[in-house]
Image (cartoon, rainbow, N blue to C red):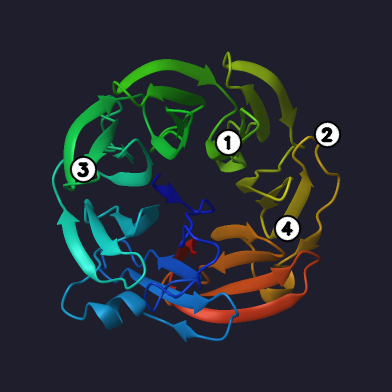
Amino acid sequence: MLVSGLFFTSCSDDDNEPDFPLGAYDNGLLILNQGNFGGGNSSISYLSMDLIDFQLNAYGAVNPNIPLGDTGQDIGFYQDKAFVVMNFSETIQVLNRYTLAHIATISTGLKNPRYITSSNGKGFVTNWGDPTDVTDDYVAVLDLSNYTITTSISVVEGPERILEENGKIYVAHLGGYGYGNSISIINASNNTVSGIIAVGDLPNAMFTENNILYVLGGGKASWTNDETLGTLTKIDLSNNAILGTFNFSDGEHPSNLVKESGQMYYTIDGAIYTASITATALPSSSIFSTNPQGVYGVCSFAVKEDKIYVGDALDFNSNGKIYIYSLTGTVLHEQTVGIIPAGFHFND
């Protein structure tokens, strides 16, 4: 299965054999740096899991004559490949995930691509299409064996985050240049939309656990002159029924929802929050703030085992930074990375 963000595949099928590295970038963290929109300066940084080895532009070191492209959006893993979605370039770069060696460029069938997941040998890529056209948004279907887009699935405006669960593809409609408030369900076997679920405004992150879909809605900001509440919606995937919706307080616009070890984590501005996945109420206070490090808006976010990873875009023009914290907020490591660190991808 192709995965992005915090979902992983195993490097070895035999627990009795040593786990030899499969390449220089195995057993480490790939940081996708978006770069400046239109600047063609996207990059991938590498940090070993022991926080010792670091490369600012690992992709460029391996592929000095093949630019990654413009506006790195997402990375999905499938078997020994990494599929890097480039938004402004409207391409997907196919790499060996352990060596970062370039394999192929997918350059047709994509229009303003965003995020990627997979099911049964097929990749599913959200596309905003022409941002001025609210009717041309779609999910592209990618043959992961020959790197070609085979078809497209029309969906409502602004398909963004996407994940697979039990042969179904769930698409969060952030809204593109508008304001979305729904989840599309795609049957991965026949590439058709089988349903739409209404959720809170601007769904920006989601995960599944025990056949329940958790969807975080940021809500409309005050500057829209139509501010709405942030929401956390729980959906029973056996029948697509809403199990419950938690409303955030006025003025709170959460993002970056992830899960780890039975806990959910999310951010509001520079503050980090956590609660049990089975919690019946939202936490009343954060576990810590990243503001002492100068982080006022978390650009990228991940939690793995006993560490919290935060990306800070700083001024969005120069190199950004990442911070790695303990679960209680102690800074364990900080590192300057590329421009606009857009995502953490654990290559283990």
Whichever of callouts 4 and 2 sits on the residue coming sooner in the sequence is 4
Identify residue type, mark 2: Ala
Q: Which residue is mark 4?
A: 271
Q: x and y percent of residue 229 in the render?
A: 68, 32
Q: Which residue does the image show at 22% across and 77% down from the upper left?
A: 63
Whichever of callouts 1 and 4 sits on the residue coming sooner in the sequence is 1
Question: Nearer the viewer's eye, disc 1 or disc 4?
Answer: 4
Question: Nearer the viewer's eye, disc 3 or disc 4?
Answer: 3
Whichever of callouts 3 and 1 sits on the residue coming sooner in the sequence is 3
Whichever of callouts 3 and 4 sits on the residue coming sooner in the sequence is 3
Q: Is residue 146 above or below residue 119?
A: below
Which residue in the rendered view is the most extreme toward the front? 16
Give the spatial CA distance, label 3 vs label 1.
28 Å
Give the spatial CA distance, label 1 vs label 2.
22 Å
27 left or right of 135?
right
Q: Which residue is mark 2?
A: 281
Residue 298 seen in the current view: no
Give the spatial CA distance, label 1 vs label 4.
19 Å
| Residue 54: numbered disc | none
User: Judging from the image, what secondary structure is the residue with disc 2 in?
Assistant: loop
User: Judging from the image, what secondary structure is the residue with disc 1 in?
Assistant: loop
Q: Which residue does the image show at 56% across and 73% down from the upper left?
A: 322
Question: Nearer the viewer's eye, disc 1 or disc 2?
Answer: 2
**Mark 3 crowdedness (10 Å alpha carbons): few <14, some 14-19, many ≥20:** many
Identify residue type, mark 4: Ala
Give the spatial CA distance, label 3 vs label 4.
35 Å
Q: Nearer the viewer, residue 129 or 327?
A: 327
